[in-house]
Image: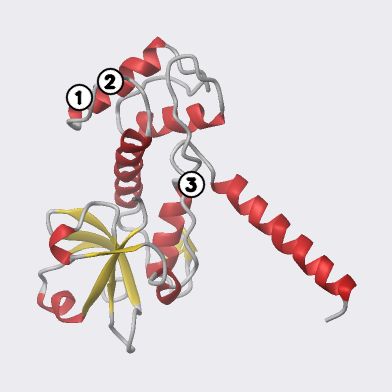
């Protein structure tokens, strides 16, 4: 490889990495701490998530004022977190987990489409990728690629927002869904033809269960 081509490829890779990080950065993925007086795009993202979860009314302003602080305290109280009105790692993680679950549920009944990646139709990994993307969390496109990321989670320790994988029509990870809690996960089901919920204890899924990965840590 000549020097000029190497420099061009390196620049392209750096540009793409920067674009991805900017496109998916928010209060959780960027790791910022938000508190009263903060003003940023991350605050706007926080307010939109709190609104989706029913803890914030009105339009997102991007300014963390007393109303936003009280909204955060209300969320913390509801989720047994330290009630300080500050959005650090633990609070941001819990909000994001709830937001991902809420997003997943909102697509219930959307048609299953092989290769689908939009709300007009999803396949399994297109669904998980899209839901995470709507919450500023990047995932690769296919189930086997998604299986390579995150951290392993034992089945007994699953939490909402974890990705659950199955070996179905071929060996290895060929199906993926988003765990919702209480033994349920949401996925694009080719059998039912829609985005739906199923139970991990269902004999089919229990028999084809491959493992789980935690994306939000």
Where, by quadrant of the figure, is residue 51 drawn? top left
In terms of sequence position, does the residue under pointer 2 or pointer 3 come before the other?
2
Please, which residue is most extreme toward the front here? 3
Q: Is residue 119 visible?
A: no
- Badge 3 vs badge 1, beta-carbon distance below 8 Å: no
Spatial CA span between label 1 and label 2: 6 Å
Q: Is residue 162 left or right of residue 203?
A: right
Residue annotated with mark 3: 136
Above-or-below relation of 80 to 17: above
Residue at the image point whose x is 32% and y is 23% from the top: 72
Q: Which of 175 and 23 is in front in this view?
A: 23
Say which residue label 1 marks.
77
Q: Can residue 162 be seen in this view?
A: yes
Which colour scheme appears in the figure?
A: secondary structure
The residue that appears at 66% across and 51% down in the rendered structure is: 18
Q: SS at mark 3?
A: loop
Which residue is rendered at x = 61% and y = 53% of the image? 20
> Residue 161, which numbered label?
none
Q: How many marks?
A: 3
| Above-or-below relation of 173 to 152 | below
Q: Position of residue 144 (x, y in %)?
A: 41, 76
SS state under label 2: helix
SS assignment at label 1: helix
The answer to the question of whether label 1 and label 2 lie on touching residues, with beta carbons closer than 8 A, is yes
Asked whether the residues under the numbered discs 2 and 3 touch, taking CB atoms below 8 Å apart as contact, a structural biologist would say no
In the rendered structure, the answer to whether residue 2 lies left or right of residue 40 reads right
Closer to the camera, 15 or 141? 15
Local crowd size for mark 2, using a 10 Å CA cut-off: few (<14), some (14–19), many (≥20): many
Q: Which residue lies furthest to the top in this view?
A: 66
| Residue denoted by label 2 | 73
């Amino acid at each position: 490889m000549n020097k000029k081509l190497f420099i061009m490829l390196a620049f392209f890779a750096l540009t793409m990495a920067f674009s991805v990080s900017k496109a998916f950065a928010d209060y959780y993925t960027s790791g910022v701490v938000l508190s009263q007086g903060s003003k940023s795009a991350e605050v706007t993202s926080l307010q939109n998530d709190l609104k989706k979860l029913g803890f914030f009314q009105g339009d997102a302003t991007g300014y963390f004022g007393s109303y936003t602080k009280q909204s955060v305290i209300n969320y913390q109280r509801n989720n047994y977190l330290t009630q300080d009105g500050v959005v650090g790692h633990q609070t941001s993680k819990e909000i994001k987990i709830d937001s991902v679950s809420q997003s997943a549920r909102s697509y219930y009944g959307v048609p299953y489409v092989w290769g689908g990646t939009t709300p007009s139709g999803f396949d399994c990994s297109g669904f998980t990728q899209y839901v995470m993307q709507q919450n500023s969390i990047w995932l690769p496109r296919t189930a086997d690629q998604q299986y390579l990321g995150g951290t392993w989670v034992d089945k007994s320790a699953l939490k909402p927002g974890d990705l659950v994988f199955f070996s179905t029509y071929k060996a290895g990870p060929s199906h993926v869904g988003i765990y919702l809690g209480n033994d349920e996960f949401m996925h694009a089901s080719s059998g039912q033809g829609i985005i739906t919920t199923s139970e991990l204890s269902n004999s089919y899924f229990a028999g084809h269960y491959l493992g789980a990965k935690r994306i939000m840590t």
